[in-house]
Image (spheres, rainbow, N blue to C red):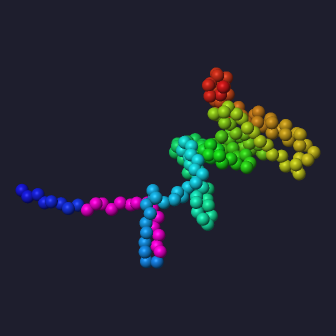
């Protein structure tokens, strides 16, 4: 048996860096030797925030991630942004997944993890300028009637009654 000696060429590999043409001349600086493209870097679990070093228009960039099976990805992303120091100028809206009542100008949200119920009502004063107090009372009564029909609300109330650790 004869064994052939194989001459193997190294496989091509990609290298990050900066290439520059000056006339016909080309120079290349590998990434380790080039300037950083990120400044003011802030990191947290599953998040990173930085500003680019672009001369034309620096950008603020955020990389966020959350589990694919998260019941409320919006809240996860918002929590990461707040951890990175980006806070909203006005309160954010309640996630639709937590809403338990939505009718006749009344909306109720149930945050099971905090054991909180938030409700808002809107009244058209052009229609109810004389009986606005009766309209407020009607919405409060609507809250009292609709919430007991919500399984999520009842489950949360029962957990609080039992002394569930999440709600203490």
Task: Please provide percent x and percent y for residue 73.
Answer: 59, 45
Whether residue 52 appears in this view of the structure is: yes
Left or right of 120 on screen, residue 15:
left
Quarter of the image where the C terminus is located: top right
Give the magenta-colored segment's residue range: 9-22
Left or right of 10 on screen, residue 4:
left
Residue 148 lies in quadrant:
top right
Whether residue 96 appears in this view of the structure is: no
Judge whether 23 appears above or below 51 on screen.
below
What residue is rendered at 33% in x and 62% in y?
A: 12
Judge whether 125 appears above or below 114 on screen.
below
Residue 158 on the magenta segment: no
Between residue 86 and residue 116, name the one nearer to us. 86
Task: Please provide percent x and percent y for residue 8.
Answer: 23, 61
Between residue 34 and residue 97, name the one nearer to us. 34
Tell which residue pokes out farthest to the left in this image. Answer: 1
Judge whether 127 appears above or below 28 on screen.
above
What residue is rendered at 67% in x and 31% in y?
A: 115
Residue 18 on the magenta segment: yes
What residue is rendered at 72% in x and 43% in y?
A: 102
Task: Please provide percent x and percent y for residue 21.
Answer: 46, 73
Between residue 74 and residue 60, name the one nearer to us. 60
Residue 110 lies in quadrant:
top right
Task: Please provide percent x and percent y for residue 24.
Answer: 43, 77
What residue is rendered at 43% in x and 69% in y?
A: 27
Tell which residue pokes out farthest to the top in this image. Answer: 162
Judge whether 149 appears above or below 29 on screen.
above
């Amino acid at each position: 048996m004869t064994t052939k000696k194989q001459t193997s060429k190294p496989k091509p590999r990609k290298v990050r860096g900066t290439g520059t043409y000056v006339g016909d001349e080309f120079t290349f600086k590998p990434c380790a030797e080039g300037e950083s493209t990120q400044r003011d870097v802030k990191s947290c679990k599953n998040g990173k925030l930085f500003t680019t070093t672009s001369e034309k228009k620096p950008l603020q960039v955020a990389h966020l991630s959350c589990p694919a099976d998260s019941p409320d990805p919006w809240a996860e992303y918002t929590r990461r942004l707040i951890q990175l120091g980006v806070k909203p100028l006005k309160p954010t809206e309640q996630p639709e997944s937590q809403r338990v009542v939505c009718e006749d100008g009344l909306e109720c949200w149930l945050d099971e993890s905090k054991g909180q119920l938030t409700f808002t009502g809107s009244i058209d004063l052009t229609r109810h300028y004389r009986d606005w107090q009766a309209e407020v009372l009607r919405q409060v009564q609507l809250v009292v009637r609709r919430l007991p029909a919500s399984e999520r609300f009842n489950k949360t109330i029962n957990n609080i009654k039992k002394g569930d650790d999440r709600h203490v």
